[in-house]
Amino acid sequence: MRIIVSLLALAFAAAPAAALAQVEPSRAEQQRIDRVLARTPLIDGHNDLPWAIRGDHGGDLAALDLDSDTRALQPPLHTDIPRLRQGRVGAQFWSVYVPASLKGLAATEATFEQIDLARRMIARYPRAFEFADSADDIVRIHRAGRIASMFGMEGGEAINNNLALLREFRAAGALYMTLTHAQNTDWVDSATDAPRHGGLTPFGEEVIREMNRIGMLVDLSHVSADAMRDAIRVSAAPVIFSHSSAFALTPHPRNVPDDVLDLVRANGGVVMVNFNAPFVSEPMRQWSATRSGEERRLQALYPGDPEAARAALDQWTAANPPPRVGVGDLADHIEHIARVAGRDHVGIGSDYDGVSYLPEGMGGVEAYPTLFAELIRRGWSESDLAKLAGGNLLRALRAAERVAARR
C-alpha cells in the first residue's frame, strides 16, 4: 500500500555525510556480495510498484520510464530498472495489491486489473523482466541476466469466498496469496482489525488446503497471530511471510511472535523481513502512532479543510521530528529471526513503494548491498547470505511444488 510521506527521508538527508558513508559496502564487501548474488538470485518478497503506478501515476505505464531514475517523479518511486540492477535484484514478487476497503467482486475485478498492469509492465521492459511461475523459472531467468518477476496477491477478499476464483488467480499467475490485508475477511482475522474468528474459520482451512493443492504459497503477513498458528497447523507446504519482521524487537501487530517463529522452523517456511521503519524500530513505531493520532485530531479540528489540517500536521512534524532508524535496526530483525527460527528460515521482503518510512541507507531498491554489508560485518558467511538472499525462498517454493504434485 502506497502512502505519500517523505519526512523521514528528509530527516536522513540532513544527516552528516560521514554518518551516512559508513553504511556503504567497501570494495571487498561488494565483491563478496556480487559473488553471492551471481550464484543465488536476490528474491524480494514484496514490492508495491504496480499499485504506486496505478494510485500515483494514473495506471499509465507510458507516463513514466522505468529505465530512468524515478526519484525525479512526483511523487517519486523507490523502484526503477537502473536501481534494481544496482541493488543486484535477481527476482521480485510484484504485489498485485488492492485496498482492503474494496469488497467482494469489486476486489476481484481490481486484483485482476493489477495482474494485467503487472503483466504489461513486464512486457514493456523485456530486456529487464521476465515472468516466472516456478522455482526453476526463477533460477533460469536469473542465469539469463534478467529479473524474474512473480505476482503476489495481497488480500484474500478478492476470492469472494469462492475457491474457483482462488484457482483462477493461480492460473493467472499469482504465486502467493496474503490471506488478508488490513481488515478481517469472512474467513480469517487480520492483524490490524478486532478479532472476529479467533484465527481461521473452517472455510479458511479449506482455502489453505486448496492453496497447497494448486501450488500457491500461503502468505501470512497481515494475518493475526492466531491465524498464523492455525494456517501453519493446516498447511502441508511451507508458508511464507512476504513482508513481516520480528515482534519480539518491535511489537507491531504486523510482526511475527517468537512462538510462531518456532512453528515456521518446523514447517519449513520463510519470514521475509519488512524494511518499513515502524516495523523495525520501537521508537519509530511509537512516533508513527502518535503522528497518526495527531493527524486524526487535526482532521476533526478542520472539517472540510484538508489543506489547513495538512499544514498544521506539517508544523507538528517539524516540531516533533521522527527518530533515526538505521540499517542496523533492520539487521537486528534478520538476526533475531535467524536465531529463533534458524538461518534457513529468513528472507527479504522490503515493501518498497508501499511504505513511507525506511531505515537510513535503505531508501530504494539500489540499497540491498548496504544491508548485506552490515551482515558481513556481523560475521555472516557467504553461504548464509545466499540463504537469506533467495536460497531459503527457493527451497520453500520447491517444497510447495512437491506438495502440489502429490495432490
Image (cartoon, grey):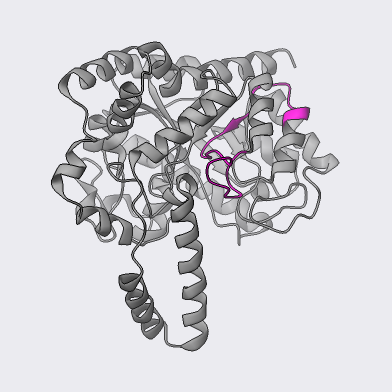
Does the segment drawn in magenta span residue 248? Answer: yes
Q: Residue at x 68, y 56 (%)?
A: 104
- Quadrant where the C terminus is found in the figure: top right
Q: Residue at x 32, y 57 (%)?
A: 8
Q: Quadrant of residue 247?
A: top right
Does the segment drawn in magenta span residue 233? Answer: yes
User: Is residue 354 visible to the viewer in this orientation of the structure?
Assistant: no
Question: Relative to 363, does residue 2 appear above or below in the rendering?
Answer: below
Nearer-the-camera pick, 239 or 320: 320
Question: Relative to 129, does residue 344 appear above or below in the rendering?
Answer: above
Nearer-the-camera pick, 322 or 123: 322
Q: Find residue 169 and report its horizontal and vertical position in percent.
A: 61, 38
Q: Quadrant of residue 218?
A: top right
Q: Find residue 326 and report its horizontal and vertical position in percent.
A: 33, 43
Nearer-the-camera pick, 396 or 94: 396
Q: Is residue 31 left or right of residue 238?
A: left
Give the number of marks.
0
Q: Find residue 25 and report its horizontal and vertical position in percent.
A: 22, 28
The magenta stretch is: 232-256
Give the dominant element type of the magenta stretch: helix, strand or loop. loop
Q: Find residue 346 and report its horizontal and vertical position in percent.
A: 51, 26
User: Is residue 183 visible to the viewer in this orientation of the structure?
Assistant: yes
Question: Relative to 299, does residue 27 appear above or below in the rendering?
Answer: above
For the view shown, which residue lies furthest in the right direction?
A: 202
